[in-house]
Image (cartoon, coloured by chain):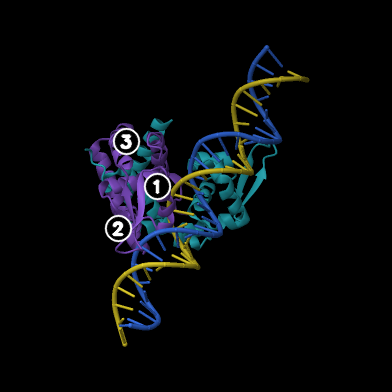
Chain colours: A purple, B cyan, C blue, D yellow
Amino acid sequence: MKDLRLDRQLCFAVYSASHAFTRFYKPLLAQLGVTYPQYLALLTLWEEDSLSVTAIGDRLLLDSGTLTPVLKRLEALGLVSRTRSTTDERHVIVRLTEQGAAMRHVAEGFPTRILDASECSEEELDSLRQALLGLRKNLNHSTA
Amino acid sequence: MKDLRLDRQLCFAVYSASHAFTRFYKPLLAQLGVTYPQYLALLTLWEEDSLSVTAIGDRLLLDSGTLTPVLKRLEALGLVSRTRSTTDERHVIVRLTEQGAAMRHVAEGFPTRILDASECSEEELDSLRQALLGLRKNLNHSTA
DNA sequence: CGCAATTACATTGCGCACAAGACATTGATG
DNA sequence: CATCAATGTCTTGTGCGCAATGTAATTGCG
């Protein structure tokens, strides 16, 4: 008779915290007119521009079936361009437009909002983040 | 020029860890023939049976638009029943079938799998879980 | 050089997640 | 008791997330 109570499940804590983040970001991202997964793609490109679909997927741990429509929507919004590589036509290179690059300034205000809402110290959030990255690594390794 | 690197974002750590959990659970849940959100509904009912759709949603932080199709699939699998309350016909009462209740025994083996894969102590996972529940509370409170 | 295996991307199908709205039932109010 | 607000569920539309498949380009091996 193991303890399977919802609030004792780490998986549900992570799952529900993830949804809470998405909801928290929603009004912030409304300023940019993008969804949370679209924002993650922008974050990736702000860190390193001109990436292939696969390269973005490697960083976000998402596959092309998920990313292709996300990137097409960002293209439709005029925030990125998608062009076939001339050297290897299998690659689609995704680049920030001027407008997409400019949005970074708005996003720079977000971390402070998280910090404020969390009612935690920067150090606490930092160790939480590192614990999650470690857990993710072990779960992914054990899955493969 | 704030630091917006992906690996420094707590939101992405939570988001990607959540997906890692879903992937990790997938082969375990294949024994039961259910998806992860369906499993969460079962967890809720194992803890307290005969709940309305809203009551399940309160516990899982999901709305009826999400839960209705999930519960219908569990019904189609023969794991739960859905019947209108006789005292208040607005409520749909969800109950475990014998088969749905029996699956709890299989699920009791899951926490150990998580613990093993995590390469963490039970105490570490416990404090991680509590930190996430606290963060979730503060984010949700600040959203509302 | 020729052809099979690989790589990269897109597409399709299914199952969430959520907003918005429709609909029926119930409870509160005058 | 007649009306209106509130409640609970379902439906529709949009956007992920992923498995499986399709297709084209490239690589590598004999």
Dot 2 falls on which chain?
B
The residue at 28%/36% (across/down) is A105
Within 10 Å of the Cα at label 1, are there few (<14), some (14-19), or many (20+) other Cα atoms?
A: some
Q: Tell us which disc is closer to us: 2 or 1.
A: 1
- Indicate the secondary structure of the residue bearing disc 2: loop
Q: Amino acid at mark 2?
A: Glu
Residue that badge 2 annotates? B119
Where, quadrant-wise, is the C terminus of chain A in this rendering? bottom left
The answer to whether residue A7 is visible is yes
The residue at 27%/40% (across/down) is A125
Residue D17, percent across and down? 43, 53
The answer to whether residue B49 is visible is no
Question: For this view, does A112 lie left or right of residue A72?
Answer: left
Residue that badge 1 annotates? A75
Residue A86, percent across and down? 31, 61
Q: Between marks 3 and 2, how big is the CA–CA gap?
A: 29 Å
Vertical comparison of A128 with C6: above or below: above
Residue that badge 3 annotates? A114
Q: Tell us which disc is closer to us: 3 or 2.
A: 3
Q: Can marks 3 and 2 be said to lie on one chain?
A: no
Q: Which of the two labelled residues, at mark 1 and mark 3, occupies the earlier sequence position? A: 1
Circle 1/circle 3 CB separation < 8 Å: no
Dot 3 falls on which chain?
A
